[in-house]
Image (cartoon, coloured by chain):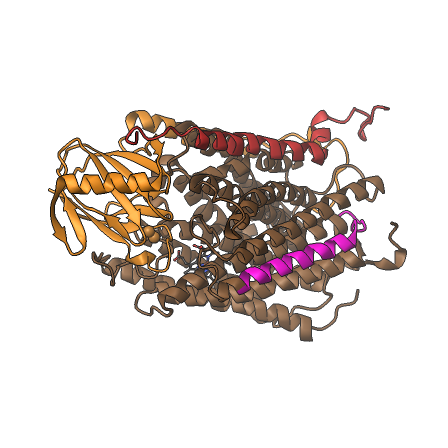
């Protein structure tokens, strides 16, 4: 693919491309909280130890 | 304009000095707010407990009954009044719509309070010192508590638990 | 499918090409939102008059029923219907594009409407006295959960239509370069919304199956964790949408240009990446989750999302200041502020929303969401105090302000009762400030939220909160009534504009 340039002829910043890439942002925006909050949370809940007061 | 598309090259616009200062200050504040939480676990006195166990509601119910039988010193209305020895494992059972039993504790002694519910969610809110913890059926939430002042404290249920939720009040007496 | 030229009109004011089907969907969703706001507002009036202990309007059963309905009508229906209108506006209108698959847009509306109607009816029939949180093991009729699920599926469809339109716009090259900031903000809201709605599905589908007798009950703490992945993240949709609307209002009212797009967009990216983990702050005093999980999810990364809000809090007013100074209001430090268009309801709504959200809602949110402080805030009146500052003063007022532009630009009618419109944001916003603050004060005394009778008159042990709390709740009651009048004025203006407003040339 040809290199895209901005008005002053310099190549477009990779940050601009990243911010324009809504699909990538979507994947990250789902993946990060899913991992940190949901999956870790499910793990925490299911690893709750049984009460030692009950035999 | 916020409603017009941007032509390529916008990333190169430098950030104004005042805005840079603001962002730096805000970032420092955020970092401080973050650090205070783990730090408080080291230097602070009030921290959410990290001790909790899985327990069937029937088992918690039985344990509370045993606890009441063992240390019962009287009754107040329909409620048993229980005076456990210092350092004991004590139980507070939430159910629709009461907190059992009435606890009689000694000031400046430490207890292991087991908090749970045997039906729906309840919320333990100690009045007037305003300490709030969640009572979740299936979980034994162990709070290590040391009453530091004498008097009568109410336990208000602050998690909606059905139509008589507002009548779910309990009592702790500290002597 | 190609859109035909007749489906477009060109806006005389902005020069934007407006796609007819998109416009109809914007109108339908916005009007439905306002109807739910009206319902929720009437219900809110009964609530505030019940918590004002001296009045104590409703009986206990109806108080909890109305509280459930208020949560659903306001937080779920009013907010999300309006957000659907914003999504269609930010994609189709701002990108000069046709709406991808308008039939799916109508499917969105239909599903959301049917879902919300089922939920509302179930609550009114007394089949779902469980609050909008519906924590298990409290059980509602299975139709209630089904209604929530249908609503959520509708909202998912709406988000997909939005993303589809972004794709179409790019492919058909209806804009060049990067999409406008407002559209970018709306995209952030839509991404957050999909995370939210997926959690709605994994919470409510198993719960529906349990209520219908098809499956065992979900673990109570697991429910809380998954539910707040839905319940709080949906508030983050409101935040992202509100900020996008702030930028939009800045541009519409004074021609504000974002100072630095890089900074503004970075703030939205931080929202997308980190804001949803903040759901954790509902679980800080719960068993079942370790300290690391709690601190991590309310700590460092979450504070990057807080940082994003701080950035917007600077860049929106700064853009407004720059725009006003360009108009020549340059004397002294504050001439621009004095000469700002305070009589324009959209501008005053923006200002009151921004200040209230930041100082009342934002700061209390960060503070109450700190692990140790949460011990003294959890489930007290501090919490409704906090979120009436965010979601009512902040988001609701911002949406109201936007309406004063949507009416002439989309509905092509002059705003009816312009004099009333002028005072409406002040009345609604400032009395809501008072409601929020008095709620927070009551919470500081340990008054619990969602309680028909804080003193427990019928219970064996009574609590006497004393005259300070009583006075405080009386002030809350009066301010609440004023806020309801402010909300009612908004609804009346909107409806009157649609029915009798003078037509504007297209
Ligand atoms: C129009 C004026 C309004 C008044 C007077 C009002 C008043 C109230 C009152 C008195 C409560 C009960 C607090 C408690 O006892 O726990 C409440 C709860 C609530 N309000 Fe409002 N409110 C208004 C508008 C709104 C709006 C616009 C929204 C959302 C966009 C909203 C969202 C909520 C939510 C989510 C709750 C909590 C429900 C629950 O605990 O389940 N309110 N409101
Ligand atoms: Cu209870
Ligand atoms: Cu309760």
Determine which quarter of the picture holds residue C200.
top right
C79 w.r.t. A37: above or below: below
Left or right, B42 with reference to C242: left
> Which chain is depicted orange?
B
Q: Colour of chain A?
A: red
B9 shown above or below C244: above
Residue beneath the point at 31% across and 61% down: C453
Dividing the picture into quarters, in which one does residue C408 lie?
bottom right
Please state if C52 lies on the left or on the right of C223 as rendered: left
Q: Nearer the viewer, residue B57 or B155?
A: B57
Can you name the residue that lies furthest to the bottom here? Answer: C500
In this view of the protein, can residue C49 be seen by the observer? yes
Give the residues in magenta. Answer: C95-121
Q: Position of residue C235 (x, y in %)?
A: 53, 47
Residue C53 placement: quadrant: bottom left
Give B158 or C304, whichever is nearer the viewer: B158
Decide whether residue C108 is among the magenta residues: yes
Task: Identify the residue shown where x is 29% and y is 26%.
Answer: B43
State whether residue A18 is above or below residue C242: above
Instruction: Note whether residue C338 is visible.
Output: no
Q: Position of residue A13 (x, y in %)?
A: 73, 26
Please report the residue visible at 61 percent of the width from the left and 34 percent of the height from the top.
A29
**B47 on left or right of C328:** left
User: Which chain is rendered brown in the image?
Assistant: C
Ligand 1 is found in the corner quadrant, namely: bottom left
| Residue B18 picture location, percent across and down | 55, 34
* Residue closer to the observer: C18 or C356: C18
């Amino acid at each position: 693919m040809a290199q895209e340039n901005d008005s002053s002829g310099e190549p477009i910043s990779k940050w601009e491309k990243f911010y324009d890439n809504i699909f990538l942002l979507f994947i990250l925006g789902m993946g990060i909280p899913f991992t940190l909050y949901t999956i870790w949370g499910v793990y925490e809940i299911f690893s709750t130890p049984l009460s030692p007061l009950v035999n | 304009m916020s409603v017009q598309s941007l032509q390529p090259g916008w990333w190169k616009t430098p950030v104004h000095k005042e805005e840079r200062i603001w962002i730096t200050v805000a970032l420092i504040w955020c970092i401080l707010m973050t650090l205070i939480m783990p730090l408080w676990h080291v230097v602070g006195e009030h921290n959410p407990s990290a001790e909790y166990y899985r327990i069937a509601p029937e088992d918690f119910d039985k344990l509370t009954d045993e606890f009441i039988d063992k240390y019962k010193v009287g009754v107040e209305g329909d409620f048993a009044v229980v005076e456990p020895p210092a350092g004991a494992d004590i139980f507070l059972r939430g159910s629709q719509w009461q907190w059992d039993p009435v606890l009689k504790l000694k000031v400046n002694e430490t207890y292991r309070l087991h908090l749970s519910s045997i039906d729906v969610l309840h919320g333990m809110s100690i009045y007037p010192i305003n300490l709030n913890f969640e009572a979740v059926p299936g979980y034994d939430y162990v709070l290590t508590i040391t009453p530091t002042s004498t008097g009568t404290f109410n336990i208000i249920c602050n998690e909606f638990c059905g139509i008589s939720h507002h009548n779910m009040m309990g009592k702790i007496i500290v002597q | 499918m190609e859109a035909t030229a007749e489906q477009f009109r060109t806006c005389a004011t902005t020069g934007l090409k407006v796609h007819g089907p998109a416009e109809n969907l914007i109108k339908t969703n916005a009007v439905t939102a306002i109807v739910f706001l009206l319902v929720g507002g009437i219900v809110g009036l009964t609530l505030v008059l019940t918590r004002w202990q001296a009045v104590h309007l409703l009986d206990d059963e109806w108080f909890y029923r109305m509280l459930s309905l208020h949560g659903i009508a306001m937080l779920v229906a009013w907010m999300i219907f309006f957000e659907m209108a914003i999504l269609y506006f930010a994609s189709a209108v701002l990108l000069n594009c046709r709406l991808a698959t308008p039939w799916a847009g109508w499917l969105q509306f239909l599903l959301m409407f049917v879902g919300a109607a089922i939920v509302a009816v179930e609550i009114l029939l007394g089949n779902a006295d469980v609050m909008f949180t519906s924590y298990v093991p409290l059980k509602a009729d299975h139709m209630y959960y089904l209604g929530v699920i249908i609503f959520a599926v509708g909202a998912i469809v709406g988000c997909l239509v939005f993303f589809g339109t972004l794709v179409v716009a790019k492919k058909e090259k209806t804009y060049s370069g990067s999409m406008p900031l407002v559209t970018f903000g709306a995209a952030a809201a839509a991404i957050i919304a999909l995370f939210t709605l997926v959690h709605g599905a994994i919470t409510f589908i198993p719960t529906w199956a349990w209520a219908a007798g098809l499956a065992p009950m979900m673990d109570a703490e697991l429910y809380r964790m998954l539910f707040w992945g839905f319940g709080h993240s949906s508030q983050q949709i409101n935040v992202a949408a509100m900020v996008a609307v702030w930028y939009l209002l800045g541009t519409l009212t004074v021609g504000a240009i974002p100072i630095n797009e890089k900074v503004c967009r970075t703030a939205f990216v931080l929202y997308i990446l980190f804001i949803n983990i903040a759901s954790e702050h509902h679980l800080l005093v719960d068993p079942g989750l370790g300290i690391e999980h709690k601190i991590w999810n309310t700590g460092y990364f979450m504070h990057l999302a807080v940082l994003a809000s701080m950035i917007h809090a600077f860049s929106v007013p700064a853009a407004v200041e720059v725009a006003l100074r360009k108009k020549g209001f340059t004397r002294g430090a504050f001439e621009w502020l004095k000469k700002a268009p305070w009589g324009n309801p959209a501008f005053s709504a923006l200002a009151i929303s921004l200040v209230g959200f930041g100082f009342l809602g934002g700061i209390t949110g960060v503070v109450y969401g700190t692990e140790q402080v949460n011990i003294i805030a959890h489930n007290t009146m501090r919490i409704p105090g906090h979120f009436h500052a965010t979601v009512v003063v902040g988001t609701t007022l911002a949406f109201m302000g936007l309406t004063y532009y949507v009416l002439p630009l989309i509905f092509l009618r002059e705003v009816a009762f312009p004099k009333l419109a002028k005072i409406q944001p002040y009345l609604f916003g400032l009395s809501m400030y008072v409601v929020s603050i008095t709620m927070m004060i009551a919470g500081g005394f340990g008054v619990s939220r969602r309680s028909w009778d804080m003193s427990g008159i019928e219970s064996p042990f009574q609590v006497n909160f004393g005259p300070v709390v009583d006075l405080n709740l009386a002030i809350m009651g009066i301010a609440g009534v004023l806020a309801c009048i402010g909300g009612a004025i908004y609804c009346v203006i909107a409806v009157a504009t649609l029915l009798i407003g003078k037509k504007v040339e297209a």
